């Protein structure tokens, strides 16, 4: 059985994963409407992954005999300046998620709730990968630059990353 504090923190995380999924879906729509098909595909894929992260937490809370609660989900921003802003925001967002996961691990550990600590290890590894992935994309965008054909190549490159993930 989870303590009230850990249940509340896990529910906050459920909410955050839901928000992440909506945020990436909204960004996908912006990319689609700007003919950036590769970026749209990548963000769609990530939106789906975040929904899986949400379900994983939701099921854990349920299986542990507590009540998962969705609550009100923050509205994502709809308008973006360009693709550089989008991927900088995704990187910043993933860093926030990492901090929240670390807080959760810390709280569960302090309570001696090792089942939750163990469950959260998957998220710890996932965040390490995600931060690395989004950082590498922002680095690539800065390297290629968005002038001339830059934007076209960025979209191709990010689309190829999405295809590679699909094939895994
Ligand atoms: Fe992209 O993060 Fe979920 O956990």
Image (cartoon, rainbow, N blue to C red):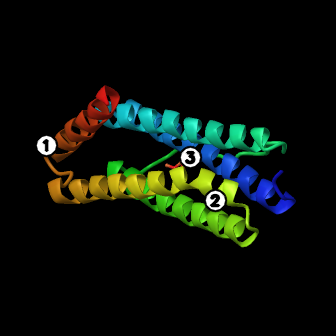
Reading the image, the residue beneath label 3 is: 20
Q: Is residue 107 above or below residue 41?
A: below
Instruction: Work out whether residue 115 or residue 162 is closer to the camera in this orientation and state it.
Output: 115
Reading the image, the residue beneath label 1 is: 149
Reading the image, the residue beneath label 2 is: 117
Other-residue count near label 3 (Cα within 10 Å), few / some / many at <14 / 14–19 / ≥20: many
Q: Give the mark, 1 or 3, whose residue is nearer the N terminus.
A: 3
Q: Secondary structure at mark 2?
A: helix
- Image position of 55 (left or right of 65): left
Q: Is residue 67 above or below residue 114?
A: above
Q: Is residue 47 above or below residue 1?
A: above
Question: Where, quadrant-wise, is the C terminus in this rendering?
Answer: top left
Question: What whole-number distance in Å separates the C-alpha atoms at marks 2 and 3?
Answer: 22 Å
Q: Give the mark, 2 or 1, whose residue is nearer the N terminus.
A: 2
Residue 163 in percent (x, y) is at 28, 30
Q: Is mark 3 within 8 Å of ligand 1?
A: yes
- Image position of 130 (left or right of 153): right
**Visible in this render: residue 85?**
no
């Amino acid at each position: 059985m989870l303590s009230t504090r850990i249940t509340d923190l896990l529910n906050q995380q459920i909410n955050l994963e839901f928000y992440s999924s909506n945020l990436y879906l909204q960004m996908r729509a912006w990319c689609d409407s700007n003919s950036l098909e590769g970026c749209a595909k990548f963000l769609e894929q990530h939106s789906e992954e975040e929904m899986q992260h949400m379900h994983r937490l939701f099921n854990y809370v349920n299986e542990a005999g507590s009540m998962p609660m969705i609550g009100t989900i923050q509205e994502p921003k709809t308008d973006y300046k360009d693709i550089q802003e989008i991927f900088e925001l995704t990187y910043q967002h993933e860093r926030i998620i990492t901090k929240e996961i670390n807080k959760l691990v810390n709280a569960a550990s302090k309570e001696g709730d090792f089942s939750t600590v163990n469950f959260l290890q998957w998220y710890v590894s996932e965040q390490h990968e995600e931060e690395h992935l989004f950082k590498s994309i922002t680095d690539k965008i800065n390297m290629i630059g968005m002038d001339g054909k830059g934007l076209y190549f960025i979209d191709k490159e990010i689309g190829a990353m999405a295809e590679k993930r699909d094939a895994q």
